[in-house]
Image: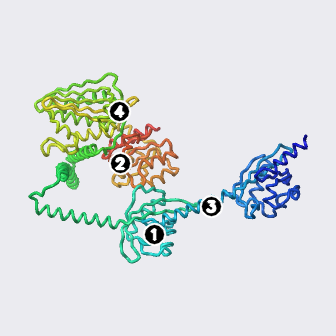
Amino acid sequence: MHQLEDELLSSVFDAVDTGLIVLDGSMRVVAWNAWFVSASGIASQDAVGRQLDELFPGAVSPGLRSAITDTLEAGSSRLLTHSLHPFVLPLQTRSGRQLIHNVSVRPLGTRPDLRCLVQIVDVTVAVQREQVLRERQNARYDAVVNSAPDAILTLDSQGVIQLANPAAASEFGYALRELVGMQMAALLNVPETWNELWTSLLEGTVMHRSVEVTARRKDGSVSFLEVSAARWQSDMRVFVTFILRNVNERRAAEEALRDLNQTLEERVDERTQELLRAEEQLRQAQKMEAVGQLTGGIAHDFNNLLAGIVGSLDLMQTRIAQGRTEHVERYAKAAMSSAQRAAALTHRLLAFARRQPLDPKPVNANQLIASMEDLLRRTIGPMHALEIVTAGGLWTTLCDPNQLESAILNLAINARDAMPEGGKLTIETANAHLDDAYGAAHIDVTPGQYVSICITDTGAGMTPDVVERVFEPFFTTKPIGQGTGLGLSMVYGFAKQSEGHVKIYSEVGQGTTIRIYLPRHRGVAQEEPSTISPAEMSRAEAGETVLVVEDEPVIRNLIVEVLQELGYRALEASDGPAGLKVLQSGQRIDLLVTDVGLPGINGRQIADAARETRPGLKVLFITGYAENATLANGFLDPGMEMITKPFAVEALATRITRMIQGAR
């Protein structure tokens, strides 16, 4: 019976389609199967009792010896692949070619009779198939590159051309063999633009849009190219592949169009008494007229404000030079007042353009409106009655409370102006559900639950054609000089930027209702942070350090001066990479103050990179406008706050102190 079992096992051992070797504790061959006899050319009876090094002198790889030793000593298993351990054993295929193989080494049995099983798997055909497929793929790639109409160049990390296609040779006027080995910068008429692009690509920056460069051909002529690029690595070497599209014809067409426009403008000046225009041209002219009115109004307002600022500063300089400082404070207040009005005008422009920086928080609209009641009564004056009707159980909404206050105040002012003889202003809140039917009728509305804020007046009302245009930027029914047409468009922009909706109802002689819908937020409204007294603001603890990353030197110096006045140690960086270098050092940093709109690496990217090694780092963002929509949708993580330019020094100091003291 045992003899039959042994014969069966021996048959199986020889029948398997892989090589099998059994080694004893002294690494001598106990047996190997018929497959291995064929691959090695050594008969089994000639191998038994001998070590692999005797059978394959100088040809057994160190990796295989190490794996066998580990198996016999520690009972571990190992896999040696052809890609990492080529030529593990000198084996041949039946056709006499080198046999490519993987080897697995594993324990067999238990101590004290522990042995080692070495299994060899033939991967020759698979590797050859991969090589054929790779060669075919490379051939297809070469065919695509060589037939491409755009110039394609691959450069190494030193900017030296390693590969060029025929279109590149044609574009630059060189033979292919001349291009390979040239520095790319030598092919450009203005290399400075290229140097900036090249540096950013080597640092790993991804190109999101193409860049235009000016090329210098071999014959000295100039060509304009639109460049896109991608960085890649092979065998630890860095390469960048560029696609360069000739845009000479497009530029020529644009130049011709500019010349044509200039010619047309000259003809219009000469012939102002009226060429007939198509309906679309007339509509465009009307839009440009509206833009002109807006520009004129804004220029007028800003020039007035700048006159107040410049004049006040001039007088301050004069009085200080004369040693007369008794009126300096009055001039400073006048300059500050004009500057704050200029900032307010800028914010209104950003609001209608939906570029205002929002700091959304959970808000209880009832509490917010109640806190505004005194301001609203003073704004509309004694001729107008004010009624506030707040709903019980009002949901919380998520929005920027300051911008909501501004929107309500704007609507109250509009309502007051619509009731010159007096009237009633009503402000109501309610929970509202906008269903699918409402969403289908208003394509820009997402069905769901909203908080509704309704402002109603008993004024003159509006005609349907005015209602249709009332939210258009620049549109106003007020006389020139009395309104820019930004008020209602600002409210509309704020609502849309907050993922909400605005609806207007009006009837001539009956009044107007404007309803703001803001999305429901399933959370509790936040309490406003408590203020900090000047005495508390001055108590910086020893060693507390703030890093300021700001590319505008005047603003950076101002922030540093505020920090030093508060007793904090201030570190400065003029751009994102410099800021990251400081953050990745071992220096103590209690707060990061960074502009959002930095060149290259923006403020949010700096903060995210810093929090990888400093997870609890507090961050105060500074922004002039919402560079992207993320400011209105989850931009600020816990421990992050935002302050908008321009900001008062006291507001900045309070914010910095509160954030650092909160982290203690």
- Disc ID at residue 476: none
Label located before the other in sequence (2 or 1): 1
Q: Position of residue 317 (x, y in %)?
A: 22, 54
**Left or right: where 623 falls relative to 69:** left
Mark 2 residue crowding within 10 angstroms, few (<14) / some (14–19) / many (20+): few
**Left or right: where 622 falls relative to 508:** right
Label 1 to label 4, Cα distance in Å?
A: 55 Å
Q: Which residue is mark 1?
A: 184
Could you tell me which residue is drawn at 38 percent across and 48 percent down?
596
**Is residue 304 visible in the rendered structure shown here?**
no
> Amino acid type of disc 3?
Gln
Label 3 to label 4, Cα distance in Å?
A: 56 Å
Of the residues tagged 2 and 1, which is closer to the observer?
Answer: 1
Answer yes or no: do the residues labelled 4 and 2 have beta carbons within 8 Å? Answer: no
| Viewer-side residue, 1 vs 39 | 1
Q: Quadrant of residue 423?
A: top left
Mark 1 residue crowding within 10 angstroms, few (<14) / some (14–19) / many (20+): many
Label located before the other in sequence (3 or 2): 3
> Amino acid type of disc 2?
Glu
> Amino acid type of disc 1?
Met
- Disc ID at residue 131: 3
| Viewer-side residue, 401 vs 76 | 76
Of the residues tagged 4 and 2, which is closer to the observer?
Answer: 4
| Viewer-side residue, 173 vs 423 | 173
Of the residues tagged 3 and 2, which is closer to the observer?
Answer: 3
- Disc ID at residue 627: 2
Label 3 to label 2, Cα distance in Å?
A: 49 Å
Q: Which residue is mark 4?
A: 447
Label located before the other in sequence (3 or 1): 3
> Amino acid type of disc 4?
Pro
